[in-house]
Image: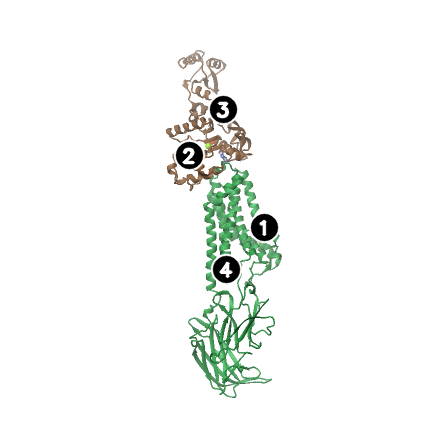
Chain colours: A green, B brown
Amino acid sequence: MRDFFYDFRRTFTGKFTIVMIVLIVLSSVGISYAGAVLSSSGSSGASPQATAYILPEIYQAHDGGYNFSLYAVNGYGQPVTGLDLNTNVSLLNYTINVKSVQSSVVSMANFTEKTNGQGFSYFSIGGNSSVNLVQLNYHAVYKNGLGAFQRTAELFINNNTVTFAPNTISASYKILKNSTNVLYTMKVANPSSQYLANEFVYYAAPNGTPSPTLNVYYHVSNGTSSSSLPPASISNFTLYKSISGSDHYVLTLPLTKTANLKQVSVALTNSTGTILGGNTDAFYSSVSTAAVLQALLQVPYEFLIPIIGIFSAYFYYGKDKTSGVLESVITRPVTKGRLFMSRYVGSAVTFLLALLIAIFLSDYVLLHYTGSLMSWTSFFGIVFGYTIEAIAFSGIMYILAQFVKSQGALLGIGIGLFFLLVFVWGVIVDAILYLLHTNVATSAGYSLSITLGAISPTFYPSMITSYVTGYYPPTFGITSSSTAPLFSASSLGITLTSVVAVGIVWILIPSLISFLLARSRD
Amino acid sequence: MIEIRGLTKVYGRTQTPAVNKLDLEINDGEIMGFAGLNGAGKTTTIRLISGIIFPSGGNVLVNGKDIVKNKIDASKNIGWVPELPNFEPNSKPVPLLKYYAGFYGLKGSEVEDKIEKLLKRFHIWDARTKKLKDYSQGMKKRFSIAAAMIGDPQNYLFDETLNGLDPEGVRNMRDFMIQLKKDGKSVFLSSHILSELENVADRIAIIRKGQLIKVLERGELSTLGTTVIRVRIQNMDNGAMNILEKYGRVESYGDSLIVRDISISAEEAPRVNRELNQNDYNVPYFEITGEDLEDYFIGLVGENR
Ligand SMILES: Nc1ncnc2c1ncn2[C@@H]1O[C@H](COP(=O)(O)OP(=O)(O)O)[C@@H](O)[C@H]1O
Ligand SMILES: [Mg+2]
């Protein structure tokens, strides 16, 4: 066995090994980095910076006139200054009875305002005792790329539906709002973290009156619902802190990864414990690193891994075997079988090492963007999946190298193999399914299509990650919005036993066949 | 020492054996020539001995170790110099020799010294920074000899190594092989030209269509090339045969005859022609000639035999 270890060491420390490791590591880490940077800047929808939320309030002066205040904040909860707002105000007389709803306009006015340095826009209109409904329309406003939400706020001046402001606020105004309290609370983006959102609190009061002391409570619970209504009770909530002295706050709740994909309820109370506002949302939405990595690497690896497998078998063994260069080694104290084995094991260990390094480093690159490392099962699932795929491709090439008599033919067949198993295989599977009149919408039909697909080694990485995630197609903890059906892995026969068995088959069968051929053929 | 026993190689089921039940021993301190026409099976035999291909029958013992069953130990004592050197073209000589040396358990400065000595000895030391693909054919051949010597084996297999060398190259190579022999090594040297082996081999095994047909001893080599009589007799019969047999050993090929080992001198030989004429034999062709080794060889292995 000395000859085996000697040649293995030489294979493993050879130039091609280093080239391969560098290639896999650099491409994987580069893709992860580029992917993370691109996805963090170009996330779906407008960026928080280019979003404006308009938070309206109407308060009635004692002289009967109506004062309007529109507060504009961006997606981070920061005031937006200089934003053009086109608004239309209608004062209505509104009657409702069993037969009909009637409303008549008492007066109407249009305003064009710009938000000031604090993000506010103010205007007012004279009142009338017959007015019992104030309708405020504000329109989409665009400025420097900002897109404001278009909203209509309707404020009923009706004792049944309108809550007047607490007495604590300026004595000269009654505050009218279309909700049961004067606090706007909502989830906003966190500028320093992609995965943790902030809570924005705005205390709607005339002229930026600071809020009274508010106690901020939060509670993490299972579920993914969101609600703009405050929770009914805070009995099992945790006090985060007390806030006061401003009319708006951006709060970063002390949430950890354990809040990931769970619902967080926030409640604000006054000093006597009355709930004044709050909402429920998913505040911690860290995408799993495994999901990001899988999404980023899937397409490039679909090409890279088979190419690496095929070319490594060619460069480590096939090239020398077909050209006869290997003969000058075979006459040394070494056997043909062990010379083959040292090259085969050398390439297999190189795949494993390269992927361990590549996925490990990519994991740390993505940590910066997702806030979490992969679980060990995801990590090894991804590493082993691609390692075994590469080994399988190399194994097929090692077999071919025993028969093919020229370098050019071997390379040609290798490239053909790549096209067959990477590109054409899916088409062949579809053709077979079509000929068999298989309905892939059924579990049995789908199972058949997967079994046929699994004949190509390109399937193995998703088989292993399906097992790890429990679903096929594999999804690492993200609810997929795609239309592809999600099957439980076990219902398709993807179990620990089948994953290990297929892995062993791909590692052992091609190597055993080529070992026996290498050992016994001229 | 190499012992070849009943060695047989059949490449394809439908082909006649390339090597057929070959028995041969190459002793320590001996240069064994291996002569045969192109396609006779020389290269096949050498590749079988070196363990590159597997025999269909028989076996090869290298210093008592079977090249198939005990490849590792047997290969330690085989130095193979192929007919056409074929090395990784992008390699440089020193790292490649180092790699080979590792299979013999050689490492460190011991190897470096050895490589330097070998490369200097074969005049490629100055070209050691070049890649092998940039070597001339002669340099490649010399490198392949150095590569065969790296493990200091007991036995050497040279496949047509003298072929294509200029006279000086031939002389150097002969001196080198004779040195190997003096060092007690066994040398197996193939050639398709018998006379190439004449001045270097102690014995020459002659192979024809995969079969060993003769092993010429050194002593026999010197008697080859003596006078023979070539004669054609139209009305050949036993009487004529009796006359010819008085003068030597007769080989007949139809009406062409060769008389070897003749008992009279070349000057007296025309007497044979006269005697045939006197006995009314019609002799259209009579020649007294000194046969050279190559004639002998062609006579032995030629296609029309
Ligand atoms: N790899 C091979 N496959 C099939 N036939 C072969 C192979 N190598 C040699 N032969 C045949 O075996 C015979 C002996 O060839 P070889 O050993 O090369 O002869 P030599 O070296 O004496 O010229 C030839 O008929 C040749 O065609
Ligand atoms: Mg030959």
- Look at mark 3 in the image and give the residue it sits on: B214
In the rendering, at what x and y percent does residue A10 appear?
A: 48, 43
Same subunit under labels 2 and 3? yes
Mark 4 and mark 1 on one chain: yes
Specify few, some or many for label 2: CA neighbours under 10 Å numbering under 14, 14-19, or 20 or more.
Answer: many
Q: Secondary structure at mark 3?
A: strand
Amino acid carrying label 2: it is Leu
Could you classify mark 3 by the number of other residues whose Cα lies within 10 Å: few (under 14), some (14-19), or many (20 or more)? Answer: some
* x and y, in percent, of residue B280 in the image: 45, 12
Mark 4 to mark 2: distance in Å? Answer: 56 Å
Judged left or right of residue A73, residue A505 is: right
Are callouts 3 and 4 both on one chain?
A: no
Against A336, is A308 above or below?
below
Both on one chain, marks 1 and 2? no
Q: Could you tell me the amino acid type at mark 3?
A: Lys
For discs 3 and 4, the disc positioned in front in the rendered view: 4
Q: Name the residue that disc number 4 marks.
A: A367
Chain under disc 3: B
Q: Residue A502: give its label.
A: 1
Task: Note whether A203 is above or below A435 in the view shown.
Answer: below
Residue mark closest to the camera, 3 vs 1? 1
Q: Nearer the viewer, residue A10 or A422?
A: A10
Secondary structure of the residue carrying tag 4 is helix
User: Which mark lies nearer to you, 2 or 3?
Assistant: 2
Q: Residue B118: which numbered mark, if any?
A: 2
